[in-house]
Image (tube, rainbow, N blue to C red):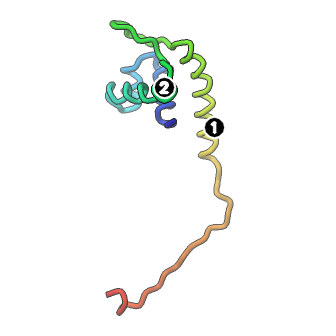
Amino acid sequence: MNIVDVHSFLEIVKKKNMSKAAEGLFLIFLALSQRIRSLEDELGYALFVRKKGCRGIKLTAAGEDFLEIANQMIKLWNKALTIENTGSKQSLTLSIIDSVAT
């Protein structure tokens, strides 16, 4: 599962509108729609109720359940980004003689 897709899902929920979410993510509508379809395909269930002519978004029951998980995933991801590498830094220095370099 791609964290970017999860972030996109949360942006749609936050904005309550796919077009506004796409704009906020600097994406075209189709790209955002494809991200959500990909996420839904991977999960195996629909996240949003889709009706022709319906402008707002509505979560499915599974989408409501996934919302809590998605929020936890983003929190964990942000926590993972704050981990500092406390191990010793190793470096490798290479030297080369000019005559070999040519």
Q: Position of residue 27 (x, y in %)?
A: 35, 31
What residue is pinned by disc 1?
Answer: 76
Q: Quadrant of residue 25?
A: top left
Horizontal side of 68 relative to 22 (left or right) equals: right
* Residue at x 62% of width, y 34% of height: 75
Horizontal side of 11 relative to 88 (left or right) equals: left
* Residue at x 48% of width, y 25% of height: 9
Q: Quadrant of residue 86?
A: bottom right
Q: Regarding mark 2 in the picture, which secondary structure is present there?
A: helix
Q: CA distance from mark 2 to mark 1?
A: 16 Å
Q: Position of residue 41 (x, y in %)?
A: 45, 26
Q: Is residue 84 above or below residue 28?
A: below
Of residues 7 and 35, the one drawn nearer to the viewer in this rendering? 35
Residue positioned most to the front:
44
What residue is pinned by disc 2?
Answer: 9
Horizontal side of 39 relative to 74 (left or right) equals: left
Task: Give the position of the C terminus as an image quadrant.
Answer: bottom left
> Mark 1 belongs to which amino acid?
Leu
> How many marks can you see?
2
Give the class, few, some or many, for how many residues have Cα within 10 Å of label 1's Cα (few <14, many ≥20): few
Q: Quadrant of residue 78?
A: top right
Q: Regarding mark 1 in the picture, which secondary structure is present there?
A: helix
Q: Is residue 79 above or below residue 50?
A: below
> Mark 2 belongs to which amino acid?
Phe
* Residue at x 57% of width, y 22% of height: 67
Q: Earlier in the sequence, mark 2 or mark 1?
A: 2
